[in-house]
Image (cartoon, grey):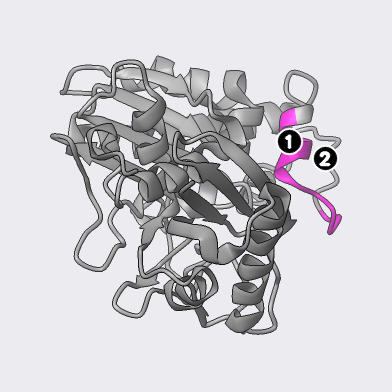
Amino acid sequence: MVYYAGVDLGATNVRAAVADEEGATIGVSRNGTPRGPTGIDVTEGVLRTLREACGEAGIAPTRIAATGIGSIGPFDLAEGAVIDPANLPDSIDRIPLTGPIANLVDSDEVYLHNDTAAGVIGERFHADRNPDDMVYITISSGIGAGVCCDGQILAGWDGNAGEVGHCVVDPRGRLTCGCGHDGHWEAYCSGNAIPDYVRLLADDDPTIDTGLALESPDFTAKDVFELAGEDDLADYAIEQLAHWNAVGVTNVIQSFAPIVVSFGGAVALHNEELVVDPIRERVSEMLLNNVPEIRVTDQGDDVVLEGAIASALTGGTGDRGQLQG
């Protein structure tokens, strides 16, 4: 029997799964992403999670023939490492991935993708129509896009294509992104950024009534969405988030002309009516291109992990016609 593995390294969670040659998952492990103090600590967390998935599958890691990885970026693709990730502590400057995983599984067939590229691989691999032109957008701790154009997964020379969360949506640059630059989409609409954006809106108009605990260190994006329809500031913030999300998504659609745009990530998955529905309503009025189907992934939180497994099964392409085994 031949086995394959997938790894999903996010800013919040690490997931790993082992699949048989038919793609059926037989072992899974999920852990929180280590917060450092160094990138090696994150690497060790990834390796531990993959070992646990192998343990649940009842196999040694060395029986893994190929491994796909969907990871936060940016990458040093030549070294197979993440460098200076925006949504992890500053002390984490480099996270080695492909080399340590190759050593663990004793196979050089290790395919590293941006997590959103793995997301679009997963969406395509499991889609009924397997469209050649589609985009997967995550709105989670950060924001990014995986793009399949004319049947090709776009990676870029350094593996960093699709970092659309770091496109400028607000030229006034009122908020600074986790990457250190101003006005980025991610600085307004990502799960990590929403609390600061709501505070900014409250400062802009202190007459807006709110019960949100803006100064609490425990104030999160979840608090904003939970008070939708009950709190003036929460409703105003959700309306403004819809505007910036529509601007960002319109730019992606105009750039790549997808047939399908699929959303994932915790912010989108847990708040479809408040996040994705307003995008559907607004982009049709902002587009020159045809309006694509806008949907939420049915792979849930595992879409990146499913894409990583599909990458391993297909030699890194995600094309079902390239199935190994």
Mark before the other along the chain sequence, 2 or 1: 2
Q: Identify which amino acid the numbered label 2 is placed on.
A: Leu
Q: Identify which amino acid the numbered label 1 is placed on.
A: Val
Element type at marker 2? loop
Q: Position of residue 148 (x, y in %)?
A: 24, 38
- Specify the quadrant that holds the C terminus: top left
Q: What's the distance in space between the residues labelled 2 and 1, CA to CA?
A: 7 Å
Q: Is residue 126 left or right of residue 93?
A: left
Q: Position of residue 310 (x, y in %)?
A: 40, 41
- Residue occupying image coordinates x 49% and y 77%: 103
| Residue closest to the eye, 239 or 59 | 59
Residue 71 appears in the picture as rendered: no
217 part of magenta stretch: yes
Disc on res. 224: 1
User: Foreground mark, 2 or 1?
Assistant: 1
Asked whether the residues under the numbered discs 2 and 1 touch, taking CB atoms below 8 Å apart as contact, a structural biologist would say: yes
Q: Position of residue 163 (x, y in %)?
A: 35, 55
Residue 102 appears in the picture as rendered: yes
| Residue range of the region highlighted in magenta in the rendering | 215-225
Above or below 51: residue 150 = above
Residue at the left extreme, as displayed: 150
Which residue is under mark 2?
212
Q: Position of residue 106 (x, y in %)?
A: 47, 72
- Residue occupying image coordinates x 44% and y 40%: 21
Element type at marker 1? helix
- Residue occupying image coordinates x 50% and y 62%: 177
